[in-house]
Image (cartoon, grey):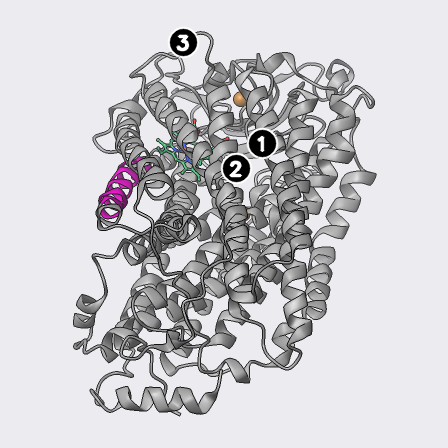
Amino acid sequence: MGKSNLEMKTSTITTKNKEDHSSLKGTLYFVLFVGSFILVSWFAVFFLYLSRI
Amino acid sequence: MHLHKYEKIWLVFGIGSLALFLAVLGVAAFAFGHQPPSHMTTVDSQNLSEDPLFSEPGLTQINESTYRATLIAQAFGYNPNKIEVPVGSTVIFEVTSADVVHSFTIPGTNVNFMVTPGHVNMAEHTFNEPGEYLVICNEYCGTGHHYMQMRIEVISQ
Amino acid sequence: MRQSNVVIDYKYDNEPDISVDPRDGKLGMVHIHVAFVAFIIGVFGGLLQGLARGGMIQLPTWLGYYQILTAHGVLLALVFTTFIIYGFFFAGMSKTHGTFSSRLRKTGWVGFYIMLVGTLIATVLILLNEASVLYTFYVPLQGHWLFYAALALVIVGSWISAVALLTHYFKWKKANPDKPTPLFGFMTTATLILWMVAGLGVAATVLVQILPWALGLTSEVNVLLSRTLFWYFGHPLVYFWIMPAYMVWYLVVPKVIGGRLFSSSLARLAFVLFLLFSIPVGFHHQLMESGVTEFWKYVQTILTFVVVVPSLLTAFSIFATFEQTAREKGGKGVIGWIKTLPWGDVRFFAPFMGMIVFIPAGAGGIINASFQLNSVVHNTLWVVGHFHLTVGTTVLLTFFGMAYWLIPVLTGRRFTKHANRCGIVQTWLWVIGMFLMSGAMHILGLFGAPRRTAYATYGDHPQALQWFEGIFASHVTVAIGGVILTAAGVLMFYNFIHLAFLAPKGHTEFPMTPDPVDTPNTPAYLENWKLWIGIAVVLILFAYTIPIYEMIVNAPPGSPPFNFLIK
Ligand code: HEM
Ligand SMILES: [Cu+2]
Ligand SMILES: [Cu+2]
């Protein structure tokens, strides 16, 4: 795929809403939520294991 | 390969969590001895009656509060199918199979291991509460699998 | 260079929407037919299991619980998945790498028929109650030898088809030496190489150990070795399901939401990591068994955790694609942009719900693999709850989301509004049913309720009775969830019939993300398959050589067959 032709196409759009659209804040919060969910559930089962020793 | 700044944060967080889990598990296992049941002794599953350990399965007392329970799992039960210990006892379970793969599982405890024919598997548990404990097989072993069970009677004194 | 994610404002498919050559389409479509027939039978099996375990129905004497469970596991986890994946691969490879040569297409048909014959024989034997050994067929329980031969046919057939697909890919690569290969082909290749390398394990135990023993040619079998070879295959098997689902996430969903995938290299890296690390990890299914030392179990636990990393990468990539696309379409706020995603489009919505379900599914998986913690959940209903989330929801909803456009593409029909609406309802029903069934299973498992066990109260032991009496954590909740799921399954089967036979003729788009902007900069080493296969083999040898050597050298006397226990 030709690079120049892609750049040409994209440049028309990138001008529209400039301030904001490369932000990945939502993604960051999403993955941090996923990570916290993993941590919490893992330690919940870990403590269940400990309580049963 | 370009990584976005947030992706780096995420990978550090994610991989860090995984490393933390592994460290906690490793310390619990290799420093404090809470290992998964991985006994290496083998037996002849078709001649258990001649085996020194399993010719007379049952409960033996090792010291004041410790017992050894040698048990044979076979379709669809355990031999013996009931043992009795006083409350506060630690029981070391040594189990093998006379036929197919079974498990030895005391629901509500960490005792939950596979019993493979030809191999002996082990776990120990301290019974701090009196009561009648249920033991079940949770590995499919044939049409009567859901009947396979035994009891551990923990008696208060 | 700034990169845009939006494709909607211009027509990048000036390159016309190449559709799949009808001859290749037919080959793809027959796989999908088999998949959905297996699916609907399997679903009714699931319903009976849920109701029987909950004590709500009693099975007739001629139909065993474990017989149904074998059919359910084989038809859904092995047959449905394998066939729909091959259908997707043949269609996608034809679209992205051009029409198959007639020789390769013929090879694909040969593979298909061999898989089909194997599937039919296995199903008949299960129905005759000659093979109630469950889909893991652990020895020394023994089913009819034909059952094992039939499974071997399925594997061999899938290898033949894999050869057709791989040859098609490498022909393209040879013809275009300076270009990175299209992502679809790259990912298909990683998945199929994984499948072939992993299949060696199950082929070895079935052909060398089990078949001769079931035929009476040998009298004993090494049980531990057979289990180990099975799980050498069994874990990569789950990646064989997940990787095609990820392909839909990486390659199809971005297009459906009107965007594009934003990095080719990261996507390739994730697939290479799957290929490398998803095989030398089978011991995480054997953590509770004797005959393998703690050391080797821990080594494979570490490798298991490594294979979580490509899923972490995927979570970020996919969500970032959503966010970038939504923002370029005018979405605002930290999460307000979510509103701009096409929620009414089932081609997006079904896979999306699959992704959401993958959060608890993945967290559960990490817990399962956690070495000694496995004793809390091993062989309990927790595990059943877990894989109904992973394969039963994440993978399945993604494949459903794919079926809505793939079937009409292959049959030359239109993806109708009606089908879309049914799809949205189907997705909700599936998610709600699964929430109840799988949620209850997880908690029951923590209380110790066993998996693979017919209705049992264990002599009315209080602990076992409690599994029926919980408010949410009860076999009754499982059964109710199962009923809702069955309704969802029937609706999906209707969707299949509608799109395959009834929808009006017309054109349906094959949504495929254009090559990401960084494609030309793809590092060449990512495409060096010899390198990756080499490293994969080294890792496998490292993780398995010593434990398997010990299993053989220190083997106890083997086990004779026990076939009377299953009838
Ligand atoms: C209508 C939907 C479904 C229902 C009601 C259902 C229900 C069940 C139940 C109750 C069990 C386990 C019982 C036990 O361990 O005793 C089970 C097992 C299983 N299910 Fe499902 N299920 C459904 C869909 C699926 C799907 C879509 C898949 C995979 C693609 C799947 C794969 C499996 C597997 C692999 C097992 C384990 C079989 C074994 O232990 O040998 N199920 N299912
Ligand atoms: Cu059993
Ligand atoms: Cu696994």
Element class at badge 3: loop
Residue B81 position, x and y percent, is: 53, 13
Disc 2: residue Cβ within 8 A of ligand 1's nearest atom: no
Evaluate whether label 1 is on the same chain as label 2. yes
Count neighbours of disc 2 (C-alpha within 10 A) and say few if under 14, some if 14 to 19, many if 20 or more. Answer: many
Q: Nearer the viewer, residue B28 or C274?
A: C274
- Residue at x 74%, y 13% (from the top left corner): B49
In whole angstroms, how far apart are the C-alphas of marks 3 and 2? Answer: 26 Å
**CB atoms at circles 3 and 2 under 8 Å apart?**
no
Residue behind mark 1: C119
- Residue at x 71%, y 46% (from the top left corner): C200
Residue C432 within the segment the image draws in magenta: yes
Q: Quadrant of residue B68?
A: top right
Q: Amino acid at mark 2?
A: Val
Q: Residue lying farthest front?
A: C505
Q: Amino acid at mark 3?
A: Pro
Which numbered disc covers residue C79?
A: 2
- Residue at x 27%, y 70% (from the top left corner): A29
Disc on the earlier residue, 3 or 1? 3
Residue C459 within the segment the image draws in magenta: no
**Above or below, comparing residue C53 to residue C58 in the picture:** below
Q: Nearer the viewer, mark 3 or mark 2?
A: 2
- Residue at x 51%, y 41% (from the top left corner): C30
In whole angstroms, how far apart are the C-alphas of marks 3 and 1? Answer: 25 Å
Residue C157 position, x and y percent, is: 66, 41
